[in-house]
Amino acid sequence: MLRKALHLRTLVAVLLGAVMVSAVACGEDPTATPVPTNTPQPTATPEPTPTEAMMEPTAMMEPTEAPVADTQTNLGLSAQAIMDHPNFKAEWGEPQYGGTIAMRTNVPVRTGSPYRGSGNSHYVGNQMTFRDTLVMVDPWIGWSGGIQGNVAESWEVSDDQLTYTFHLRQGIKFHEKTDNHQVDMPGFGQELVCEDVAFHMNFIGSDRYWDEGGSLSSLVPGGTTWTCPDGPEGYTAQAVLDSGIPFPGILNLLSIPGVYGITNAEWLAWSLETLDVQAIRTYPEYTIHLGTGPFMPSDLTPEVVAQGVRNPNYWKEGLPFLDVFEYHTIADPATAFASFSTGKIDLMGHGSGSPYPAQVEQANRDFPELGFAPNHYFGGRAVGFNTEKPPFDDVRVRRAVNLVMDREAWKEFQNIPGTDLYAGYVPAGFFNAEGRAFDPMGHSVEEILQWDGWRQPKDDDIALAVSLMDEIYGPGERPGPFQCLSRADDTSTNACLFMGGNIQEHLGLELSLDTYDPATLSSQLNACQHTFAVTVMPGWEGTPDPYLRYRTYHSELRGARSCMGGVEPDVQSRLNNLVNEFLVELDYTARTEISKEIESIMYNEYIPAAPMEWQVLFTGYQPWVKGFDILPDQSVHTSHLKIHQRTWVAR
């Protein structure tokens, strides 16, 4: 049956994108840097011995567990094949069907937007399971296994590396309508064809995409134009890089399961025409989401729990194994840990919802049956400056604050042994598609630790910082007091409080805490009325190309980082020119030199924030969770955010 024709407008991105960021931090009381008595102490990591009250957290919903049959399971072709996977672990045992997995998130679960970008309302963890991407990274191998086909079974790249042609699998169907669906919308049960891919991809980067809160996180530099050489009902989709400049990282971006999860073309057109701008983010009917993924949305209690159920018609025969997954909002870290340690939560730990190091230490001591996997993350915690508002429109003040930040004391406070201090690039241990360690085209750790603000001991840096402040305001005279904007969780507030201790002790600057829920915080930050705010340094990315983190500081690109208008014009001009050069320079050695120059400017002249450290995330999982593998340094594509289709439970 022919589908209703759609006008596939070319909605081309007019920017050269930005950076994907996330972070986590917390630990024990610092000893090297006293916090002023008029400032709240950073929240020390609790020793959360479960109490009777904690064992029944109000945010929890009892899992709707389906029993696992005692009879031998009849694995489908896809499921049977995974037992022959080279990374299949014998201790997992044979996969089993049925059951529920409950996962904790520390941010409010809501309907969310399927096309907002990489950072939907609850880390897109559940939505990633609703929609498939063209290509993927194997969650049991990671980047070292290279890019593999998913909805696209094969692809070719033109000789000039500007055109990508994808051949779609035939017979893939969008979710069928069920009793859960209360909205009369198009697309149910239709076959995925080229027009779905083209319409979805051409939407990314359009004006409406930005109106919907779309982020720069995963946009291809310069944008792409997608067409259907064999017609909209065909199975060939073609992308052309609009910039005319090769970008080898495009396949990495297309494998990221956030914004690049394919929606139905008629459904997407209907939602854009029917719903008000950003209405879908809090739409009351959660099952409005439509895709081809292994799970379907089933139920939502806003800010409490979101639930997805198995897609009985999933195109990968025999998958998924689970019947149900649940994302529970449990903001309090002690309550979350109690829920996990008493078996009410099966999985916890993603981004700022990671268990604290002290909690992991306690679990290893008191609950040895629980599993924890560390994952070196791709972002650095920092306290950022609004360069458009005094006093941080003066780079000398930004530099002074950066100078007194004691990274070693923060690292000790965080209680993360082995965490290296990096300035702004992918940390060591990242592996590329060839399985070798990736050189991030930046300065070595040894070089960075010689920079102002990174040196130990801190005496010279502190003296320099005081002289800069005296030069501006006079001895003993200081601006302020100031507020530090933070999300209302320990992960974020500790960064503000620790910074407050540093600048109070060494610079005489008073800093208080101003906390918000995530949505309100975003509005506050976008308004650029703050002075300090918890942020991250550019570094978390879906593809190992430094351009993706540098471009967000290019002032002439749409979507550039806000509140940076106060940077000195000559510094901004030099940075813009270098970022432009970096994009078009394809020689690796030459790119490395440009990258190092950009990095040096960012951290020593531009100074958008005072960086702290790279994060180590911990994922906790119950012993009955099987097929859930956490690969070091590859959390985006493995098990950091989503319940992938190979996961099962064996209680």
Image (spheres, rainbow, N blue to C red):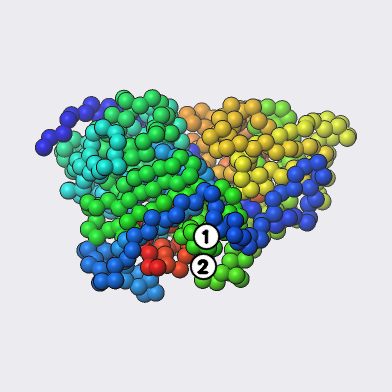
Q: Residue at x 42, y 46 (%)?
A: 306
Callout 1: SS: helix
Q: Residue furthest right?
A: 475
Say what amino acid the circle numbered 2 marks: Leu
Tell me which numbered mark, 1 or 2, is placed earlier along the sequence: 1
Determine whether 329 is above or below 361 in the image.
above
Give the side of residue 28 with respect to residue 4, left or right: right
What is the C-alpha distance between the residues marked 1 and 2? 9 Å
x, y percent for residue 450: 70, 53
Percent x, y of residue 31: 78, 56
Q: Farthest front residue?
A: 52
Residue at numbered disc 1: 340
Left or right of 365, for residue 629? left
Front-most of residues 363 and 506: 363
Asked if residue 339 can be seen in this view, the reply is yes
Q: Residue furthest left?
A: 1
Residue at far bottom of view: 90
Q: Which mark's residue is nearer the viewer, 1 or 2?
A: 1
From this view, report whether residue 629 is shown above or below residue 424: below
Residue at which label 2 appears = 370
Q: Residue at x 77, y 32 (%)?
A: 481
Q: Is residue 378 left or right of residue 490?
A: left
Q: Residue at x 63, y 62 (%)?
A: 49
Contact flag, marks 1 and 2 (Cβ < 8 Å): yes
